Amino acid sequence: MTTRKRRVLIGLGSVVAIVVVGAAVLIATLDQNKAKKYISASVSKATGRQLTINGDLKLDLGWISRVSANQIQFANADWSKQPQMAEIQDFEAEIDLWQLLTKFRLVIPAVTLSQPKLVLEKNSGGVANWEFRAAPTGPQKRTEFPVIEKLIIKGGMFSFDNQETKTQIELKVHEAEGAGFLEQPVKLRAEGTYQKLPLTLTLDGGSYENLRSSKTPYPLRINLGAGKLKAIIDGNLTEPLKMKGEDVSLDIQGDDMAKLYPLIRLVFPTTPPYRLKGHLKHEGDVWSFTNFSGRVGGSDLSGSIRVDTAPKRPFMKADLVSNVLDFKDLAGFIGGNPGATPGKPASEEQKIQAAAEKTSDRIFPDQRYNLERLRSMDADVQLRAKKIIAPKLPIDDLNAKLTLNDGVLNFAPARFGVADGQVEIFSTFDGSKRPSQVKIDARLRKLDVRRFLAKSSAAEKALGPIGGRIVLSGTGESFRELMATASGNSFFMMSGGEISDLITQLAGLDVARTLGVLVRGDKPVPIRCALLDLQGENGQMNVQNLIFDTPTSVISGGGSIDLRDEKVNVVILPAPKNFSPLSLRSYIRVSGGFKNISAFPDPIKTGTDSFFKKLVNVLTLLVTSPFQPRDFGQGEDVDCQALFSKVRNQDPKGIVFKDVQNSPKPATSGK
């Protein structure tokens, strides 16, 4: 460098230094509070909202300059009930002038916010309070983002109120601190409360150099805990400033998936404790959670979920698979309590509900449906379970298709493999109306009777398919209310097959023939036909026909099933087709609540609802048994075809009847 050039540069440097020093002296001697009105005017012009600095504004110049202000208020949208969108008690920021002047890079060594309060809202029309008249200036690209070495938040309050979807979130931060530099990882630690639950948040991100680079994804790991909800997000963001382009793994666990609604606005039924891990991706308006697997209660679950947030109501499409499904985990679909699994306690609400169900004499759950949530999204869900654990029911597998559209929930259909046959359930739950309405059409096809007798000795002597159809409709806000108002008809039928001879003799209280069966051995007897036909309304289902016909006896009956009070009151009468010298044959009353149904002789039909009545019935049975005319073989063969024709109109497509016709042919009379 020549001497002349050196002199020129020294001269220019001196001029710049004089200007900087002069500007610093000028700013330092000015009343900085007078600048508040200029700052407020600039912000108001850019956003259409008033910015007010009620406290002092200070600027301390130096190579590390400090700007501080207190009692800052930023006005809310004019439609909001909250006058201020943002408030900060104390604000302080440091600016590295040396980096700014020599490297043209904005470096902020520290930012401290004390008692900040931020209110985010959407009104009923979907307008957000963060939508301004003109877009506020700020970093729109990753390369424009300033370097912040440390961010400290003390005693913050953040709230979100979406009046359109009735979603409310309140977040209190006791203290949060973020740290990092151009080449060092960014770290954030925060503690607070969410929905009155203790909240912990840790964030480990890439360096600010990563953040400012537009060529490489930004690495991010977040650990979030809110009560029993815990989530770990680990992966990359392609657009971190806009929170878009997530390509991360998500490991989430909690005590009830229904509690996820305030966070993600997706409706799930009440579930037992769960843990799922998979791949989370965000492209445009579409979120996807794919290749996930884990457990929900006692069931394994895997599959994929895709959510499109562009429509007015988010649309979820899911394909779910379970290799082994615990049947009780499905209780939440009808408002029941799915309970907990060993080592994973249920939520407090579920514990309270379980305790109430245990002491109640009812089996229908009375948990009210949240109709507002049902109307908040649409869905198309496929659920397949290859094996089902149901100790008290012979259920094998499940293949169900569920759709939700504007509050109307459809199963079309839900196919259960039951007792080596199939139960097809077509149902519609219309939650778009009040009271909600339900329609159920269930078809029972070729259910093997022996599977219902479990591992008893009678099961080995039983054979034959059961068919039937249940068509009901009702209204109400819970499953109990729906059943209490149910109207419709149902039938269950059987033709052909076999059953234990001992069971038929015991049903008729035939002492002599029962002893004979025990001596010669229990052999199966053919079933000619059987039918149970129920019809009724408003929860009162009356028995139209109850017939069970074998070559040796015919059993008939009548009565009612009360779905409102969950009680059974049916009287059956066995009639032998052959003479028996020793019999205690009598009317038998089947009665009691659904939880404790019992059968007891009722020879003169006085009832069996007390100990005294049962004692009288036993004495009456012993006294009148020698005079029972039914012991002289007055039972007659039932005209099975004529019997079945009475319910043929309840199966217009002939699905159940076709199954029955393909069953073994009925046996002839044993007379």
Image (cartoon, rainbow, N blue to C red):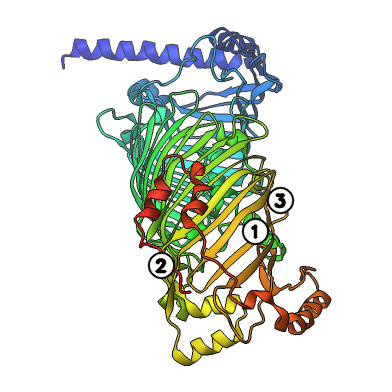
Residue under label 2, please give it.
Answer: 667
- Disc 1 to disc 2: CB gap under 8 Å: no
Rendered view: 515 above or below 66: below
Dot 1: what SS? loop
Q: Position of residue 641 (x, y in %)?
A: 46, 53
Q: Is residue 400 visible?
A: no
Q: CA distance from mark 1 to mark 3?
A: 11 Å
From the viewer's perspective, tell me whether residue 182 is left or right of residue 334: left
Mark 2 closeness class: few <14, some 14–19, many ≥20 residues within 10 Å: some
Type of amino acid at the residue the image marks with label 2: Ala
Dot label at residue 23: none
Q: Position of residue 479 (x, y in %)?
A: 63, 47
Residue 620 in sight here: yes
Quadrant for the N terminus in the image: top left
Q: Closer to the camera: disc 1 or disc 2?
A: 2
Mark 1, residue position: 363
Q: Residue furthest bottom?
A: 519
* First reached walking from the N terminus: tag 3 or tag 2: 3
Give the structural element (helix, strand or loop) at label 2. loop
Looking at the rendered structure, which numbered label has been put on residue 564? 3
Lower position in the chain sequence, tag 1 or tag 3: 1
Q: Position of residue 539 (x, y in %)?
A: 68, 47
Q: Nearer the viewer, residue 606 or 41?
A: 606
Q: Nearer the viewer, residue 285 or 238?
A: 285
Which SS class for mark 3? loop
241 left or right of 515? left
**Could you tell me which residue is drawn at 35 percent across and 21 percent down?**
104
* Amino acid tagged 3: Arg
Task: Please state which amino acid type lies under the numbered disc 1.
Answer: Ile
Choose between 236 and 43: the one closer to the eye: 236
